[in-house]
Amino acid sequence: MRRIIVIGTTGSGKTTLARAIACRLRLPHGEQDAWNHLAGWQEAPLPQFRAAVDTLTAQPGWVMDGNYSKARDIGWARADTLVWLDYPAQVVFWRVLTRTLRRVVGRQELWNGNRETWRGAVQADAPLRWLFRTHWRRRRELPEQAVEYPHLTLIRLRSPREAQRWLERLSPEAESARPPRSA
């Protein structure tokens, strides 16, 4: 387990878990949102985004988080492990809601100078609305997508507590932290 992608519904904690995995395994971390959201919330040109994914995943070991299909053919093909945060919608809803409130009120900078705003929090592509548009579809489609990459070990974590226990067992020497492939 040296090339890991962390996926899950918006707000499920992909980046937080990916950073923790990278720290425990002493691997570089890449965040697809940071590569995709340029200053002023402009979307990165496709070649630029794919180049960032390519650069990270060309290394012998790495942890990357994000669900972007526009570079899945690069990242998933090079990964050996897919960690799926498959939490219930109500868990993710509360995480997204509290995260959005914290970011807006605290004027937290996210990527490239971008900040969430009250106005942005209600737009069609805002995390809270995006959750309702994608959560159930991703749950349905992900197992089918993973079958296209049979070399991947799929680790499906169904609750924050399960994810925390799994992370606590993870160390560079502890390959036993990897449960059997599931769908």
Image (spheres, helix red, strand yellow):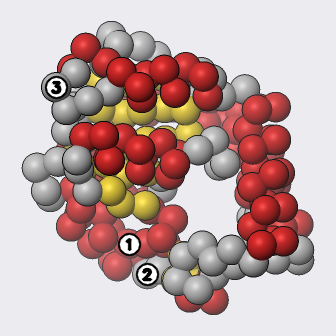
- Which residue occupies 32% across, 27% down? 170
Name the foreground residue: 179 vs 134: 179
**Amino acid on which the number 1 mark rests in the picture:** Phe
Query: Which mark is first along the chain, 1 or 3?
Result: 1
Residue contact between numbered discs 2 and 1, judged by CB atoms under 8 Å? yes
Q: Is residue 2 visible?
A: yes
Residue highlighted by disc 1: 49
Instruction: Indicate whether 12 appears above or below 49.
Output: above
Query: Which mark is first along the chain, 3 or 2?
Result: 2
Residue highlighted by disc 3: 173
Residue highlighted by disc 2: 45
> Residue placed farthest to the bottom in the image?
40
Instruction: Indicate whether 28 appears above or below 90.
Output: below
**Amino acid on which the number 3 mark rests in the picture:** Glu
Q: Position of residue 94 (x, y in %)?
A: 82, 41
**Amino acid on which the number 2 mark rests in the picture:** Pro
- Which residue occupies 73% across, 38% down? 92
Mark 1, secondary structure of its residue: helix
